[in-house]
């Protein structure tokens, strides 16, 4: 039986409002309480009754889920300075927040959730019309759920001319709705049409890229393709998240909603995590399918570890991440040889990175320098990004961009948004890419992207 505890923050809100009136300033109020019996997916689902701006984030390695509903502060920047401008604006709000948070818990309080498009200068081209170039949001209601329990943070921006009694009443009502268990049966969607976007032309772009790679101008470039789906009705995002969470338990499961469009996925690829000033990154590049039997699986894994083309793809990523991390961290620990990272449908070459973040740097400083790693862009970085812009047959939007969260206490994590789909009503665009090096074969890369598309396809009515 669900237990709803309503947290009374009336007095705090009245106090902040008085101060806002006195100073003639808008003030951010943040209050965190411990709650019980609230399921993150139910909270997300109920959130649609309150606001069409919702966020969902589930960690790949620990029991840690964040769900954000609505927005108290929404920051959208573009251009080369977007990471640092976002960081600066977040700090300004946090330096001035009126906060009640008795829990020393990462991911509570003025947490900002969101992401950044792949390119700093991309415009809202089809199918990304609803998405700004980047957006980090401090939600009005944030559920933080981990093995120790659940915490609800209410963040409200209080204006001098607010009717504070009405604000109090609405926030209490919203919380009651969010903490009500959902009863809806979320039916799976029925897939009516699958359309691969120009697959033969895409294979030719791979062949052309290998020529460019052979002449030495580029060392590696990641090229992605799109598959469009049509369903018989609008897809339930709650159901998609539920299925991704149960099927892809070594991946970050995420959803970002903007004006009725959803960017959803299950990515295995960490960009960077900071916790207690420890920094963790990951090099994930080089791919082979899982085997049908244990023996076959092991054989495929061994072949991957010894495969020259995949090791080259992978080593470019390790080199680049090492260089970027050394600027911001000390005691950098990176093993010499990769391990295997096994997912439901495929296995990757994986090298974990661990270091100590130097004082004075933030998570977003590291994100700025790491993005895009050669697992998503290529090498040299700028030439590869330009090559992608000029040759790829799709608009990346937020695909392969950094997505994640950051709290007011220097903790946070960003992953890269691959194995993902943009869903609007009864349509979806799925994206998958592959690292192209000079020995790449177009047909093999095409097959690799096919396997990478499987997790999203499987939760959207397709075959696994
Ligand atoms: C770009 C994607 O995967 C990257 C991450 C891991 C392995 C990769 C590869 O082996 O090609 C890619 O670099 C994608 O899934 O869309
Ligand atoms: Mg590959």
Image: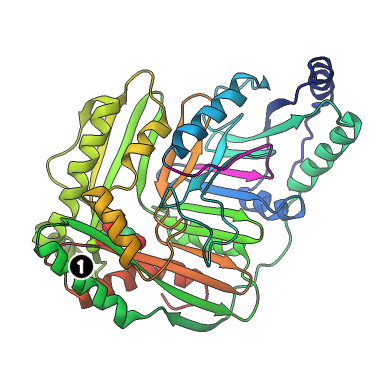
Q: Is mark 1 within 8 Å of ligand 1?
A: no
Residue 341 in magenta stretch: no
Report the number of discs: 1
For residue 241, above or below residue 101: below
Query: Does 298 sit left or right of 419 as displayed?
Result: left
Q: Can the viewer see residue 211?
A: yes
Give the percent coordinates (x, y) of residue 289.
Answer: 26, 68
Query: Does 244 sit left or right of 445 as displayed?
Result: right
Which of the pair 378/344 is nearer the observer?
378
In the image, which residues are magenta? 64-79
Residue at figure coordinates x 41%, y 27% from the top left: 362
For residue 455, above or below residue 150: below
Give the percent coordinates (x, y) of residue 447.
Answer: 27, 75
Residue 72 in magenta stretch: yes
Quadrant holding the C terminus: bottom left
Residue at figure coordinates x 13%, y 60% from the top left: 302
Q: Quadrant of ligand 2?
A: bottom left
Give the percent coordinates (x, y) of residue 316.
Answer: 17, 49
Which of the pair 73/79 is nearer the observer?
79
Q: How is the image coloured?
A: rainbow
Residue at figure coordinates x 55%, y 22% from the top left: 104
Residue at figure coordinates x 83%, y 25% from the top left: 160
Q: Can the viewer see residue 343?
A: no
Query: Does 168 sit left or right of 373 as displayed?
Result: right
Residue position for label 1: 209
Secondary structure category for the residue under label 1? helix
Quadrant housing residue 426? bottom right
């Amino acid at each position: 039986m669900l237990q709803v505890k309503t947290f009374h923050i009336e007095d705090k809100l009245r106090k902040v409002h008085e101060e806002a009136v006195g100073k003639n300033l808008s003030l951010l109020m943040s209050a965190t309480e411990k709650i019980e019996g609230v399921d993150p997916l139910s909270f997300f689902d109920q959130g649609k009754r309150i606001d069409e701006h919702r966020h969902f984030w589930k960690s790949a390695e620990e029991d840690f889920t964040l769900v954000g509903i609505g927005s108290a502060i929404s920051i959208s920047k573009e251009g080369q300075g977007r990471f640092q401008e976002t960081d600066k604006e977040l700090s300004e709000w946090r330096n001035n927040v009126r906060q009640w948070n008795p829990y020393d818990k990462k991911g509570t309080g003025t947490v900002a959730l969101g992401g950044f498009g792949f390119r700093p200068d991309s415009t809202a081209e089809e199918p990304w019309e609803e998405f700004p170039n980047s957006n980090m949001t401090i939600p009005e209601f944030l559920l933080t759920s981990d093995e120790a329990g659940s915490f609800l943070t209410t963040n409200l921006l209080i204006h001098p001319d607010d009717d504070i009694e009405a604000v109090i009443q609405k926030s209490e009502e919203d919380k009651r709705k969010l903490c009500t268990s959902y009863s809806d049966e979320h039916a799976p969607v029925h897939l009516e049409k699958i359309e691969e976007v120009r697959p033969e032309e895409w294979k030719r772009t791979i062949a052309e890229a290998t020529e460019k790679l052979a002449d030495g101008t580029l060392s590696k470039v990641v090229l992605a393709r799109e598959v469009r789906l049509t369903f018989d009705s609008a897809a339930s995002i709650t159901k998609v998240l539920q299925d991704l969470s149960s099927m892809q338990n070594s991946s970050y499961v995420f959803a970002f909603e903007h004006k009725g469009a959803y960017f959803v996925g299950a990515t295995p690829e960490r960009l960077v995590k900071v916790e207690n000033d420890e920094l963790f990154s990951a090099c994930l590049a080089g791919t082979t399918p899982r085997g049908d039997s244990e023996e076959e699986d092991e054989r495929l894994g061994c072949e991957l570890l010894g495969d020259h083309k995949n090791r080259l793809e992978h080593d470019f990523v390790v080199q680049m991440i090492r260089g970027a991390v050394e600027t911001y961290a000390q005691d950098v620990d990176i093993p010499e040889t990769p391990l295997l990272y096994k997912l439901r449908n495929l296995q990757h070459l994986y090298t974990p990175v661990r270091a100590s973040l130097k004082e004075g740097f933030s998570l977003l400083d590291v994100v700025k320098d790491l993005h895009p790693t050669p697992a998503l862009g290529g090498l040299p970085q700028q030439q590869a990004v330009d090559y992608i812009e000029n040759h790829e047959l799709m608009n990346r939007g937020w695909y392969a961009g950094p997505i994640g969260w950051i709290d007011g206490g220097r903790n946070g994590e960003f992953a890269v948004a691959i194995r993902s789909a943009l869903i609007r009503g009864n349509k979806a665009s799925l994206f998958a890419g592959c690292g192209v090096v000079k020995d790449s074969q177009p047909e093999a890369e095409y097959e690799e992207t096919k396997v990478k598309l499987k997790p999203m396809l499987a939760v959207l009515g397709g075959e696994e």
